[in-house]
Amino acid sequence: MKKILFSLLGRALLLVSLTALASCNDDKTEPSGGTPSVAIGEITPQSNRLTFALTLRDAEKAFYLCLPATESAPSAETLAAQGIPVSQSQTVTVDGLLPETAYTISAVAMQGDRLGSVATASATTAPSDAEPAVKLTPGEATTTSLSFSLEMQDCARAAYLLIANPKQGQTPDAEEILRSGTTVESDGTHTVNELTPATTYLIAAVGEKDSKRSEVVTIEMTTGFDASAPATFDRQVAGFYYGVPAGYNYAEYYVVLSEGEATEQEGIYTTTGAGRTLSIDLYYFEPLSGDPAITQGAYKYATSKSLRTFDPEKTRGTVNDGKGGIRQIEFKDGTIDVRLSGSTYTITASLVTTDGEEFTGSYTGPLTLENREEEQEQNLPPLEKELTGMSFVRAIAKYYNNDETTDQCTVELYDVEPGGSDGYYYLLDAGHKLSVDFLVATGDDAQIVEGTYTVADTNAALTLIPGYEESFLDSTMALGTYCEEYSEERVSTYGFASSGTVTVTRTGDTYSFDVKLKTSKGYRIEGTYEGAIEMYDKR
């Protein structure tokens, strides 16, 4: 009986011991410490950064993100996958933030593969301590639009304003730009349309934030123009009446028209900005009485200075591209139509340039002609000696239409190498220039036919136009057939041919000239040339 009781008691004690042992084994596999966590300390805000402390507890690392408060807080798993890791408690600074903007900082701690709860804290960055500033950069310019970029720094908004044809020193103040200009709230490229062609614009801009304003910045841009489009001249910049030139039957009327403000240099008028000018030189009867005025009608191209013609030597245009490039335009054909209603002229030019391009333009408005008829009495210094045995070394010619039966070819013969280029030459060193105005029968080719040409005022083929001088603008020009002598003292004297001949022979491209002329003062002008002619066809 005792043996049986002992056996039952032993079994019970063994079961208790095994249970206690199992309990001890379970306590040893449980991780030490509590749940991992991270605390976000007090946040110090600046205009572009936030600084705060991260304190880790029961964690081997933590992850954090700083996002705008408008975005949803990330989950623990998102933080662990995308957050910025730290391996110990430390102070953290987040840079590159926007001023006066609310942000939320989210963080989570990790121990092994266990994540704690997400901790969050919010703060707003401080106002910017930088001054607002704007920058303008020119872009594309067309005939009627301008494009430019406007960049803002530390600005809540900005505004820009355009002023056409600004006066020197004219700059709008910030108040005017913000009040009357176009408001923008971000960086970008801006295009202003429906502008006036060939016009300079001042573009002014200012930025603003709270009570602070940037400095006013400006750039200038100029709209372009299509030089092939019809010109609309808005002003007369010069006008003269010269009376009847020596050796001719009709009076001379000279007018300069312009697209915008223009300047003059050595008789050539050009616009100060992008635009065109047109100088026209017309021939008609002398005015019967009163101030000189242009008689209405159509004036055609001709070199003969005859009734209802325009002179191609003095009728020319200029084009200013607004970028520093200015070119002259010459014409070889066309008409200039003049109409008059009361005191208002309407002038319409339909011309063909020597490059074969069309040039059209119009003007409507009054005209004023300054009477310079008395200035025709001025004389160039006369040549007071004979010039014989001259041997010319260079020949340069310009070939023009004259009328229905004749063409005009002006040949310049030099006995020294001239200065200049592109058909425009002059005596640079002491020497002689003989300018011979040939009239030849109208032909297809720009050439001087062989024969003996005689000085005569008949406007017929195989004649030479007599020499004469003519006042034009503020100078006196030698025209027709004449000889210029340029001395070592840089003084020019002129002998005007009134009689004589020039005999022309030709073999291929080689011309021979035998000059036997006599001036109006009775002095002989004689010389020879053999060689090629540098021909400029102006028809």
Image (cartoon, helix red, strand yellow):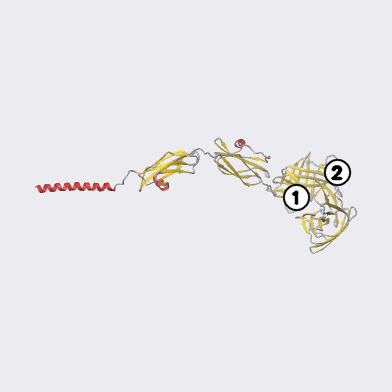
The image position of residue 448, as x and y in percent, is: 81, 59
Residue at image location 14% in from the left, 46% down from the top: 9
The image quarter containing residue 366 is: top right
Q: Earlier in the sequence, mark 1 or mark 2?
A: 1
Question: Few, some or many C-alpha atoms within 10 Å of disc 1 (few <14, some 14-19, many ≥20)?
Answer: many
Q: Is residue 126 left or right of residue 425?
A: left
Residue where numbered disc 2 is placed? 374
Q: Amino acid at mark 2?
A: Glu
Which residue does the numbered mark 1 point to in the structure image?
A: 351
Q: Nearer the viewer, mark 1 or mark 2?
A: 2
Packing grade of label 2 (10 A; few <14, some 14-19, many >=20) is: few
Horizontal arrangement in the rendering, residue 131 relative to residue 53 (left or right): right
> What is the spatial separation of the Cα atoms under label 1 and label 2, in whole angstroms?
32 Å
x, y percentage for residue 528? Answer: 84, 61
Q: Is residue 409 visible?
A: no
Q: Quadrant of the C terminus?
A: bottom right
Rendered location of residue 115, percent (x, y): 36, 45
In x, y percent, where is residue 185?
Answer: 55, 40
Q: Is residue 21 visible?
A: yes
Q: Is residue 403 left or right of residue 209?
A: right
Q: Amino acid at mark 1?
A: Leu
Q: Secondary structure at mark 2?
A: helix
Relative to residue 473, is residue 442 depicted above or below?
Answer: below
